[in-house]
Amino acid sequence: MGYRLHELEPISIQTWTQLCHPDDLAVSSQALDLHFRGERDLYQVEVRMRHKDGHWVWVLDRGRVTKRSADGKPLLMSGTHQDITDRKAAENVLAEREKLFHQMFESGEAIKLLIDPETGSVMEANLAAANFYGYPLEVLRGLGMSAINTTHPDELKRLMERAAAAQQCKFTFKHRLADGSERDVEVYSAPVDLMGRTLLLSNIHDISERIRSDTALAEAHARLEQQAGELAQSNEELEHFAYIASHDLRQPLRQVVSYLSLLERRARSKLTDDEITFLGFAVEGGRRMDRMIVSLLEYSRVGRKKNEAQSVSIGDAVADALDNLKLLIRDTKAVVDVAAELPKICGDQLELSRLFQNLLGNSIKYCRPGVPPVITVSVEQAGAGWIVDVSDNGVGIAAEERERAFEIFHRLSNTENQDGAGIGLAVCRKVVEHHGGRIWIEDTSCPGCRFRIFFPAPPSTKGAS
């Protein structure tokens, strides 16, 4: 306490009362009185005493009366003062921590259990746990986890041992409630040292709704996959049927056209002008039907080959298309400007060549009277892929017809006088979709048409062409 003995002399009860903390005097006086009356063999209290420099020091004060008068009054007392300030500070810290722990344990709506992994019993539970499980707190405290957890007791004990050793902290269980119903729960357990024992502080999260939602989502996904598979099979069967039907139709149709042409030649002198015209209509109708069947065959072939996709240069596909159209380009004096660098994608070379041959051929075919076709093929980066543009200065496509332009056998209003089966753009869309892309028509500031085609980049490509 910082004093020398002579500074405290003469030592008496008054010396004690002057140095003791006022709040501790009553406790000290009571203990001293009990000892003086002989009701306690030893006087012992923990009190605060003023240090010489003014601060308070916790001391363990022990003493005993060593001399009494003839009538039993205490005359002399001896004892010890032990500095316990550090111990009291540690006890205060521990008390604050325990208070904080209990506040955190009890507060909120989180379900919390304190479990003894040795016995498998619930040592403590909060109100949220009682509400969730449906047990009164006094029943829940002391309840064995095997009454709650549906896991086999041996396996449950093994898992609690793993949690106590901090080898695993997250678990998924089914917990049984007081009414017998079961809930899916996610449990987070961590070992804590309390009361000289290792216990498990467990936070329980009810995930029953999430499990039900996940199950329903998985079932819906499985149904969609099944339906998608059935649809893909149905489409494949329909395309195969279209291929077989159109292939088998061509032979009898050729015979019809051939015999009609032969009849026209042999009986021409015996026919009237109207009859010759009628025969001409019939022959031309047969030939037009044959072209439609050929176009249908072409449409049904798109995507039928199951070859493994390879790295294909769009520039090479455009070059092949231009080579196939070189006579038409020469005859129409068309000008085709192709970007110097076009990207590579995963796909089929023949299908991509057919795509650009159809688009470039249409741009040349449907030009404005007296105006040589001017066609531009350009490219731009677009997120995880590229957009290839095919623009021309032709007759264009009206806004209200742009979506229907890609329908099979649909003829545009401004192309009715041109040859064609109305299947070219349908083939284009099918080719693009087979390559995981999209094709559409956009407005242009000048007369003409602008086709935009999005191609996804190959998985290993990081935006480089």
Image (cartoon, rainbow, N blue to C red):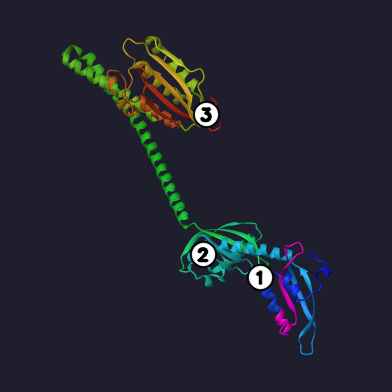
| Residue type indicated by callout 3 | Gln
What is the secondary structure assignment of the residue under circle 1?
Answer: helix
Residue beneath disc 1? 23
Number of other residues with Cα within 10 Å of mark 3, as a class: few under 14, some 14 to 19, many 20 or more: few
Which mark is first along the chain, 3 or 2? 2
Between residue 137 and residue 211, name the one nearer to us.
137
CA–CA distance in space, label 1 to label 2: 41 Å
Q: Position of residue 458 (x, y in %)?
A: 52, 31
Between residue 453 and residue 260, name the one nearer to us.
453
Residue at horizontal 34 percent and vertical 11 percent from the top: 371
Residue beneath disc 2? 129
Magenta stretch, residue numbers: 32-56
Number of other residues with Cα within 10 Å of mark 2, as a class: few under 14, some 14 to 19, many 20 or more: many
Between residue 165 and residue 231, name the one nearer to us.
165
What is the secondary structure assignment of the residue under circle 2?
Answer: helix
Number of other residues with Cα within 10 Å of mark 1, as a class: few under 14, some 14 to 19, many 20 or more: few
